[in-house]
Image: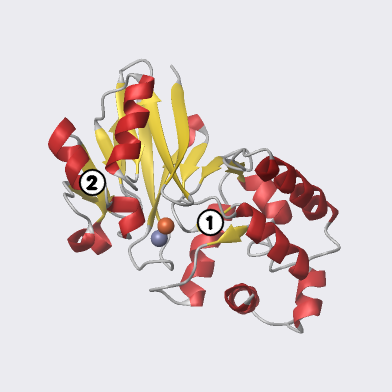
Amino acid sequence: MALEIHQFPCLSDNFGVLIHDTERGVTASIDAPNADSVRAALAEKGWKLSYILTTHHHADHTDGNLALKAETGCVIIGPKAEAAKIPGIDTQVSEGDAFRLGSYQVQVIETPGHTNGHITFYIPTANVAFVGDTLFALGCGRVIEGTMEMMWTSLAKLAALPGNTAIYCGHEYTLANARFALTIEPENANLVARAAEVEALRKAGKPTLPTRIDIECATNPFLRVTSAAIRKRLGLETAPDWQVFAEVRTRKNNA
Ligand code: ZN
Ligand code: FE
């Protein structure tokens, strides 16, 4: 049994992702940023779309829903908390729900903050999570609908997944994130090394994703709010974790 994962760039800086259970021949698209791009990726792989798994309602994650559903009859699974905003949604899911995708069990983790209903799809037996616009490599999503405290709670849930969990994200923002991260924790040798790696990958036109939970925990300033060096730099030595997160997020917004 194997889960094949095909990631492809689309729109200006989004990623499309197809997952395919080779044993059962079941295929899902993680979000559908754009029908043409997803259709082309399906054709390239020779896969037939069975599901769209929607992380959140933003147009750059749902624009392809209706066209792809009309063409393939796929079932669209998305967050109950913002179901009214998900075009073509068939099945509404929330925290703790699980469903079968071929021979795999997919678990739903609510990760609100970027939007109020944002969810993550986690497949424990494949060691992979699809986090949409919640966590990015060396960064995190903008807190648009929720509160800073809510977003911090969501990120902490993802940080608690097993270290070897592969993380697929909605966007290629890593280079800008790396440059910002260095302003928050310049003394972090792992971060310095990774920033150089990211520069080289982008120069070569290669994606920096997927990432991994252990790599993010070691280098992503939004997950490193317990670091004494970061707290000292921000003048927040005794603040609760979510306030340190909020300060880092605010600085990124203004960077
Ligand atoms: Zn978004
Ligand atoms: Fe997005």
Please give the label number shown on residue 135. 1
Direction from residue 251 to residue 65 in the image, left or right? left
Residue 166, relative to residue 87: is it above or below?
above
In x, y percent, where is residue 156?
A: 56, 61
For label 2, the SS is helix
Badge 2, how many Cα within 10 Å: few under 14, some, many 20+? many
Q: Quadrant of residue 254?
A: bottom right
Residue 135 placement (x, y as % from top left): 53, 56
Give the quarter of the figure containing the C terminus: bottom right
Q: Is residue 173 left or right of residue 189?
A: left
**Would you say the beta carbon of the disc 2 residue lies within 8 angstroms of ligand 2?**
no
- CA distance separating discs 1 and 2: 23 Å
Q: Residue at x 24, y 30 (%)?
A: 50
Side (left or right) of 136 relative to 76? right
Neighbor class of circle 1 (other Cα within 10 Å; few <14, some 14-19, many 20+) is many
Indicate the amino acid at tag 1: Leu
Judge whether residue 161 can be spotted in this image: yes
Q: Give the residue at x 46% y 50%.
A: 170
Residue 73 at least partly seen: no
Foreground of the two, 142 or 8: 8
Q: How is the image coloured?
A: secondary structure
Q: Measuring from the top left, give residue 232's x and y in whole percent.
A: 81, 78
Judging by the rendered image, the residue that carries numbered circle 2 is 65
In the foreground, 175 or 88: 175
> Relative to 171, does residue 182 appear above or below in the rendering?
below
Amino acid type shown at disc 2? Asn
161 or 65, which lies in front? 65
